[in-house]
């Protein structure tokens, strides 16, 4: 895998260019999500593999904003990659930032879209099921010293 996300090598279109291209096929006005998908053309933003049917909307858990569309493999890797390339470059300049968009991520499964929306009790329960210490803001909290 390259140190540069594939989307960083694609020509960046203006909003006007994307809207004009959208209207060649559609009558309804496009959303930013529509324009992002049009620009990515069914390709993963990181590896560029065409995957029209299975691309997933990657989002920033701190802001709740969509970054771009990734194949399932890259989406899983992104969540576990840490500060290494091409993931750092993707996070710093995702497709939505390249195109001047801010798309609020909507979780179609009804769950939280940012870390702050996850109830602490749920985080604690998930950590227990995985047999890992619960990481609380500011340090670790094990079951013996936890309140509740």
Image (cartoon, helix red, strand yellow):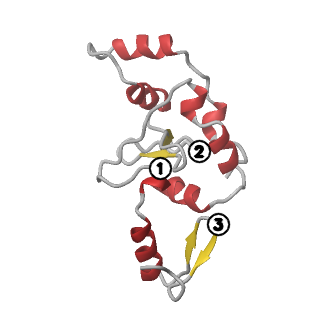
Q: Nearer the viewer, residue 46 or 124?
A: 124
Q: Position of residue 28 (x, y in %)?
A: 27, 16
Q: Return the x and y of residue 77 as percentages of the image width and height.
A: 57, 59
The residue carrying mark 3 is: 138
**Is residue 31 left or right of 123 when viewed as pictured?**
left
Could you tell me residue 139's position as x and y percent?
64, 71
Secondary structure beneath disc 1?
loop
Residue drawn where x is 56% and y is 24% of the image: 99
Cα separation, mark 1 vs mark 3, equals 34 Å
The answer to whether 65 is drawn above or below residue 1 in the figure is: above
Identity of the residue drawn at 29% across and 16% down: 26
Residue 136 or residue 18, whichever sits in front: 136
Say the numbered circle drawn on residue 46: 2
Label 1, label 2: how far apart the Cα atoms are: 8 Å
Residue 95 circle label: none
Q: Which comes before the other along the chain, label 1 or label 2?
A: 2
The residue identified by callout 1 is: 71
């Amino acid at each position: 895998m390259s140190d540069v996300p594939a989307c960083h090598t694609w020509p960046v279109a203006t909003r006007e260019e994307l809207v004009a291209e959208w209207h060649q096929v559609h009558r309804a006005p496009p959303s930013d999500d529509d324009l992002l998908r049009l620009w990515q053309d069914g390709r993963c933003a990181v590896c560029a593999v065409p995957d029209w049917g299975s691309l997933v909307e990657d989002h920033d858990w701190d802001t709740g904003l969509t970054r771009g569309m990734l194949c399932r493999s890259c989406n899983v890797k992104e969540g576990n990659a840490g500060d290494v390339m091409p993931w750092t470059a993707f996070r710093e300049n995702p497709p939505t930032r390249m195109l001047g968009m801010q798309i609020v991520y909507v979780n179609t499964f009804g769950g939280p879209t940012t870390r702050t929306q996850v109830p602490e009790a749920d985080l604690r329960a998930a950590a227990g099921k995985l047999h890992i210490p619960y990481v609380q803001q500011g340090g670790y909290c094990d079951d013996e010293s936890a309140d509740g």
